[in-house]
Image (tube, rainbow, N blue to C red):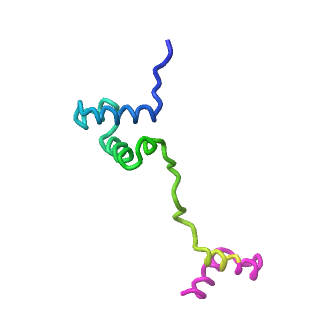
Amino acid sequence: MPWNEVKPMDQRVLFIADHLRDRYSFGELCSRYGISRKTGYKWLGRYRSDGVEGLEERSRRPHHCATAYPFAVRQAVIELRTDGGDVLGPKKIQALLARRYP
């Protein structure tokens, strides 16, 4: 006997269809699908804004790197490294940059 596997996208479409039929309260509908109310409202909001395409899985990758330095700072570090040779380590570079750009 094969397993009954439901794809996540199909589950979301069924959830929205059941919500539009208005048979159950929202909390009961979420518990029937084994999701939190927060997730249910997230799916509903995506459906309302983007239609069925909004229910597809989205990337969880960050949109930007929080620890990235601005381009000017990176260029200044590269300039110090090439001018100073191997004698400049991170502490000396930090001190020079602090003096140069207060």
Q: Can you tell which quarter of the image residue 12 is in?
A: top left
Residue at 38% in and 44% down: 47
* Residue 94 higher or lower than 61, as above or below: below
**Along the viewing direction, whichever of 10 and 63 lies nearer the viewer:** 10
Q: In this view, does 17 lie above or below 77?
A: above
Choose between 32 and 97: the one closer to the eye: 32
Check if residue 7 falls in the magenta segment.
no
Count of picture labels: 0
Residue at image x 71%, y 80%?
79
Along the line of sight, which residue is nearer the eye, 88 or 66? 66
Q: Which residue lies at the image location 38% right of the left edge and 50% below the top edge?
A: 49
Tell me, yes or no, whether the highlighted magenta stretch contains residue 95.
Answer: yes
* Part of the protein shown in magenta: 79-102
Residue 46 position, x and y percent, is 39, 47
- In the rendering, at what x and y percent does residue 81 appear? 72, 77
Q: Quadrant of the C terminus?
A: bottom right
Q: Which residue lies furthest to the top in this view?
A: 1
Q: Residue at x 57, y 86 (%)?
A: 101
The image quarter containing residue 40 is top left
Along the line of sight, the residue nearer the viewer: 74 or 26: 26
Left/right of residue 11 with respect to residue 69 in the rendered view: left
- The location of residue 57, given as percent across then percent down, is 48, 42
Question: Would you say the magenta stretch is mainly helix, strand or loop?
Answer: helix
